[in-house]
C-alpha cells in the first residue's frame, strides 16, 4: 500500500517537472 502511494507521488512529481521543463 505504501509503495503504491509513494509511486503515485513520484509520478506526480515527474509529471510536474516535465511540464515545468517544457
Image: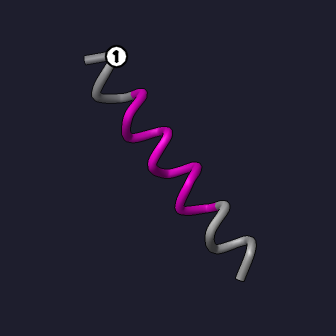
Q: Is residue 14 above or below residue 5?
A: above
For the stretch drawn in magenta, the main secondary structure is: helix
Colour basis = one colour
Q: In the rendered picture of this protein, how many numbered marks are placed on residues? A: 1
In the image, taking residue 6 as reference, residue 19 lies left or right, namely: left
In the image, taking residue 6 as reference, residue 18 lies left or right, namely: left
Q: Residue at x 74, y 74 (%)?
A: 2
Residue found at the far right of this picture:
2
Residue 20, image x, y percentages: 32, 20
Q: Is residue 7 above or below residue 17?
A: below
How many residues crowd around disc 1 within 10 Å: few (fewer than 14), some, or many (20 or more)? few
Residue found at the far bottom of this picture:
1
Residue 15, image x, y percentages: 38, 41
Q: Residue at x 34, y 16 (%)?
A: 21
In the image, taking residue 21 as reference, residue 9 lies left or right, namely: right
Q: Which residues are magenta?
A: 7-17
Q: For numbered disc 1, what is the local secondary structure?
A: helix
Q: Quadrant of the N terminus?
A: bottom right
Residue 13 falls inside the magenta stretch: yes
Residue 22, image x, y percentages: 25, 17
Residue 3, image x, y percentages: 73, 71
Q: Which residue is mark 1?
A: 21
Name the quadrant containing residue 4.
bottom right
Q: Residue at x 45, y 49 (%)?
A: 12
Q: Is residue 21 above or below residue 16?
A: above
Amino acid at each position: 500500500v505504501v509503495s503504491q502511494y509513494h509511486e503515485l507521488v513520484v509520478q506526480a512529481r515527474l509529471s510536474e517537472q516535465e511540464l515545468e521543463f517544457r
